Image (cartoon, rainbow, N blue to C red):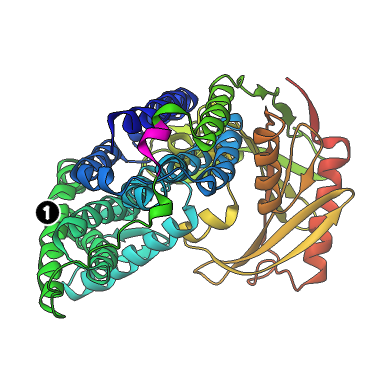
Amino acid sequence: MSINFKLGRFVPLLVVVLCMLYGFANMFVRLSYIFNDKMEDMSFGWYVPIFSLYVLWTQRRELVNVAARPSWGGLLASIPFCIIALLGSRGLQVRFEQIGFIGLCVTIPWTFFGWRFARCFFFPAVYLLFTIPLSTFLDAVTIYLRLLASSTALSLLHGFGIDAVQNGTAIISNGMHPFSIDVAEPCSGLRSLFALMALTAAYAWFNLPTWGKRFALFASSIPIAVLGNVIRIISICIVAASSNEKFALGFYHDYSGYIVFIFAIISMLGVSNLISRFGKERGGAKADKDEKEEDCENPKDFGKTLSPVVLVSTIVLCAVFVFQGSTPAPEITQPPKIVLPEKMKGMSVSDVFYCHKEQCSASFTSTQLEGSRTCLVCGGEMFNISLGEKTVLPSDTVISRKMYEDYATTYRYCVSSVVGGVNKSSIHRPELCLPAQGFLMKESIDIKVGERPFRVIQILHKNGMSSFLAYTFFNQAGVNTSSHTYRIFTDTWDRSVLNRVDRWVMITIRVTSHLSNRGVEISNPEDIKQLTGFLEKLFDGELKEGEL
């Protein structure tokens, strides 16, 4: 391949790459914050692109040998990834931007040097998927991993003779050294799972000869990570039961993760050794067939004239990336102001307060506290939002909550108003947090009060008492829905296409009753009638909406 051939192809490619870096500059900045975010716990993300670049460096000679003529197919394949990246950039959807970037890392080399050249980029590009923040995105998976870890740990603790009970994702013991340990999101094992999967994929790429063996080792990282997380939780509980809770949740909790990860790495090496013993080794990789004559450019002709594919691709891609990098920030609408009624006819109204001590986490109404702000259980300070809401939700999330009790029927309605911030994580489905609190969801129905749809979920407590939770969503633009999927779709459309961030509101109503031991049930028409009547009162002039 002549010098003119190399320069004639690589110079336009370099220009495209520089424009691409400009277009994705904001994505890189956002990822730097994500990698340092304690909630995402993705510090390993910094090493992922370094490894991808190293893999390309090891294939540098092969890249030169397989470079072929430009491909219109590569340019066509780049278009959908450009659209995804552009939508992600406009809507502050960093995951969309990453998918677009990863796809372009394959299709752009395909455009300039053919498919065989692009194949060398496939694994390094796919490996970049480990930089996508999924811990807070996969809340549903996280909750069930937490429940699995806590229930498995509880069973094994009973085998060690430690008396403990499970309450949702929490493990509680009232023995000689009492403790209460909640398997929170950082302890779900999902983050350590991603880190181990990334490490296993890198190890398998260089140390196992076939794709089948590589995939087998990669798949083994999932049970290894889950087992390691269960062992860590058990060890924390044992330390708490044998010494004290403060040491177990402090020093030991912070450093036990490193020990467990070392255990996971040793297990991964052991599994790799077993996998490598199965199957016969091939005498060597089968050499690729030589390029067909028509697939090769004439170096002399290419040095004189610029290929139409390269020229068009350079102009189109550079224009898209420059436009993407110059996209203005989305308009952020003013959040609606929601005021829960201080009075309601025939009902008592009180505020709800929460203890922020993890070992207690009790809640009381202002009526029960009688003007005090001291926890009736542990004596700690009480706050108007729970500890989980304070630590997990973004700071611009606005939460208000009141308890309404009907004098005549003794139905109780705990109403919560959550005004979401700019970050989408301000609001999530109640179905994600209810299992973690120890509640069992039995069934759900949809009702409509006026123009507002509500989803009603039947909840069963461990003590056998049943209640239900009703919720609805609406935004500044007047969209009303009880579907979380529809809300997400609408929000994504507004952010990506309209370049506008609407502020969503979620209203939840938790309904309980002391009329009977059964509580309230969806199958009881009277319970639904009481809920509907309360919602009519709440939204018919009682609950106030307006501009901040």
Residue under the image location 60 percent in, 22 percent down:
327
Which residue range is magenta in the image?
297-302
Examine the image and state in which quarter residue 203 appears: bottom left
**Label 1 crowd bin: few (<14), some (14–19), many (20+), radius 10 Å:** few
Identify which residue, 158 or 132, lies in the foreground: 132
Does the magenta portion include 420?
no
The answer to whether residue 320 shows anywhere in this view is yes
Horizontally, is 164 left or right of 427 in the view?
A: left
Residue at the disc numbered 1: 262
Q: Specify the quadrant that holds the N terminus.
A: top left
Amino acid type assigned to the residue bearing label 1 in the image: Ile
Question: Between 100 and 516, which is closer to the camera in this rendering?
Answer: 100
Per the image, is 299 magenta? Answer: yes
Which quarter of the picture shows residue 151? bottom left
x and y percentages locating residue 467 in the rendered image = 64, 63
Which x, y percent locates residue 528? Answer: 79, 63
Judged left or right of residue 373, residue 31 is left
Q: Quadrant of the C terminus?
A: top right
In this rendering, does residue 422 appear at all?
Answer: no
**Residue found farthest to the bottom:** 279
Q: In the displayed structure, would residue 291 be above or below residue 348?
A: below
Q: Position of residue 389 (x, y in %)?
A: 49, 39
Residue positioned 68% across, 36% down in the render: 504
Q: Quadrant of residue 231?
A: bottom left
